[in-house]
Image (tube, rainbow, N blue to C red):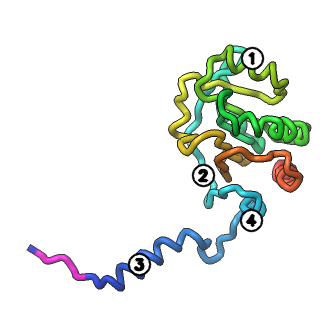
Amino acid sequence: MKTPPKYSYRGVIILFFLGAFAGLFPAVGEEKPWYAARLQSLGFQVFDPAFEFKDFTVLTLEGGMKKRSSLQGKLALLNFWATWCPPCKEEMPSIEALGKAMKGLPFEIFAVDLGDSPAEVKAFVKERNIGFPVYLDPKKSLAATYASRGIPTTYLIGKDGKFIAGIVGAYDYSNPALVSLLKEMAAR
């Protein structure tokens, strides 16, 4: 029986730190996306690299179906929320303002309510005069995958369908710096 090789604690510690910090720096010749630093300065976690994720289908308020993959070719704001969530309610007016600011650009808001009944969501949308698309996940089947750290959870999805950034918690989406950046991203 072979004896396992002996490693010095110093060597293990050096390997640990090299491995831990390797992901913080791009490989030689690899550049971060042009928008990364700007999104980070606005509080978003930028995914490096951007990644594809399995498709899903949600219900529309009218009873139809909508696939996340239908966003292909558009910059998208994918927001997970619920009618009972105070931070979600707080950010809704800014999402509405963002939708109006992005009108005419290849941009879409894809807001998914997690767990409320269709009647509750319809009443909420009507009461708050929400004009952006709202979808339903009445069984909360997407919560563990997309909003495991709490709601609201929001992702930015690139025109290629890849998840490029995310943020957990209420956010002011009408922030002029963010609106300017998203307009630039949508126009490219």
Q: Say which amino acid is labelled 4.
A: Ala
Label located before the other in sequence (4 or 3): 3
Q: Say which amino acid is labelled 2.
A: Phe
Pinpoint residue 25: horizontal percent, then vertical percent: 60, 73
Compared to residue 33, the image places residue 56 above or below, namely: above
**Disc 4 vs disc 2: which is toward the camera?**
4
Does dot 2 land on a helix, a strand or a loop? strand
Does dot 1 land on a helix, a strand or a loop? helix
Q: Residue at x 65, y 28 (%)?
A: 84
Q: Which residue is mark 1?
A: 123
Pinpoint residue 82: horizontal percent, then vertical percent: 65, 30
Does dot 3 land on a helix, a strand or a loop? helix
User: Cβ–Cβ below 8 Å for labels 1 and 2?
Assistant: no
Label located before the other in sequence (3 or 2): 3
In-image side of 171 versus 23 (left or right): right
Q: The magenta stretch spans which residues?
A: 2-6
**Disc 3 vs disc 2: which is toward the camera?**
3
Q: Say which amino acid is labelled 3.
A: Leu
Distance from Cα at disc 4 to Cα at disc 2 = 18 Å
Q: Which residue is mark 3?
A: 15
Distance from Cα at disc 3 to Cα at disc 2 = 27 Å
The image quarter in which residue 128 lies? top right
Q: Tag on residue 71?
A: none
Pinpoint residue 91: horizontal percent, then vertical percent: 76, 39
Label located before the other in sequence (4 or 2): 4
Q: Residue at x 35, y 79 (%)?
A: 12
In-image side of 161 versus 96 (left or right): left
Q: Residue at x 66, y 50 (%)?
A: 166
Q: Tag on residue 37?
A: 4
The image quarter in which residue 58 lies? top right
